[in-house]
Amino acid sequence: MDAELQADRAALADTVRRFAESEIAPNVQAWDDAGEFPRALYARAAELGLLGLGYPEELGGTPASYSLKLPAWVALARHGKSGGVLASLFSHNIGLPPVVLHASDAVRREVVPPVLRGEKIAALAITEPGGGSDVAALRTTARRDGDHYVVDGEKTFITSGMRADWITVAVRTGEGRGAGGISMLLVPGGAVGLTRTRLSKMGWLCSDTATLHFDNVRVPARYLLGNEGEGFRMIMGNFNGERIGLAAGALGFSQACLDEALAWARERKAFGAPLIGHQAVRHKLVDMQMRIASTEAWIEAVSAQGDALEAAGRHNAPEWVAQICMLKNHATQAMQFCADQAVQILGGMGFMRGTVSERIYREVKVMMIGGGAEEVMKELAAKQLGWL
């Protein structure tokens, strides 16, 4: 890594840390209790350039490699200490890439800049009540009717589903079942016939999550992304960035658990000595650090590999996709371990709302499921490695 990239990474991570420590972490418990965070937070993140990180300059963004973005993702998780905030605040990072890559220039300029300025919110809607990870089995339909598509169906577990002004929706435009008939359609949040139902969750309490209902929703045909039947490929490519982001978040949350557990072990006394003076506790902390270090090394390698492959025009190379799938599992398993050990070290306090470790303990399961469940990741990795 050259000196310029190292300096840029350090400066960006420091900016993110200060933002997270001052504007996210002190408010997380209140926002969880309220079930939402202020919409003004989008504008504040946009002012610092965080929403536009990785997007084209002509659309109001700042181009950035995986290696440059990585420390920012980790710092947001470690110092913001809330998966719920990050999930909704950055839901555009899964909703907008298909628009940037496949929409017409006019639609890109209509949709992307206001989102990156924090004025509008973007979301992605793929999962359906009966489908889960089986994207090829989705049933939401979009029927062409003149200059419009008519959308019918349901989507669920949609992050920013209640607030989103633009929703990138996976629909079936072709006949029958399977991947070949899937397309991607951009649906305005105010479209007639679109209704939303808020969902209650175990974690990510301040992130709105919704089921979306489409009842004869008419969408202008200009909002079709790419061509009909190309949606499955778009979805699979979009997963790469999402899964790296999830792995980076898991790393940051693992570090947040270690930070809290280590501070508690140094301050709390038991049997005449600080907790850290007891071998059993020290060993738990070391086990946490081992998993953090391995995750950090792996995600740095995968990010650098991704940058090199993109420069060579091979951004969906099978060997890289396999690494991402395995990394995502490893990182979230490390997060699960660190959250569990931190709660154990904190003891009764670890069971209390308001501690970082308690929140992350509840949030870890969605990290292990979202973006592709562990079992799906293993199967996809095996296929990409040519084992099947």
Image (cartoon, helix red, strand yellow):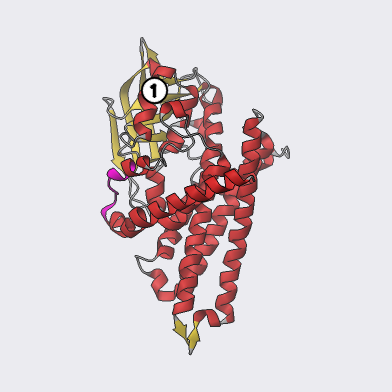
The percent coordinates of residue 153 (x first, y second) are 37, 29
Residue occupying image coordinates x 39% and y 73%:
349
Foreground pick, 330 / 8: 8
Q: In what element is the residue under mark 1?
A: helix
Q: Is residue 187 magenta?
A: no
Task: Indicate whether 344 appears above or below 172.
Answer: below
**Disc 1: which residue:** 109
Amino acid at circle 1:
Arg
Residue occupying image coordinates x 48% and y 47%:
12
Task: Indicate whether 29 appears above or below 278.
Answer: above
Q: Is residue 40 magenta?
A: yes
The image quarter containing residue 379 is: top right
Is residue 14 something that shows in the picture?
A: yes
The percent coordinates of residue 359 (x first, y second) are 40, 60
Q: Quadrant of the C terminus?
A: top right
As drawn, the residue found furthest toward the bottom would be 272
Is residue 81 something that shows in the picture?
A: no
Label 1, residues with CA under 10 Å away: few <14, some 14-19, many ≥20: some
The percent coordinates of residue 272 (x first, y second) are 48, 90
The magenta segment is 34-42
As drawn, the residue found furthest toward the right would be 387
Task: Indicate whether 173 appears above or below 45.
Answer: above
Foreground pick, 260 / 60: 60
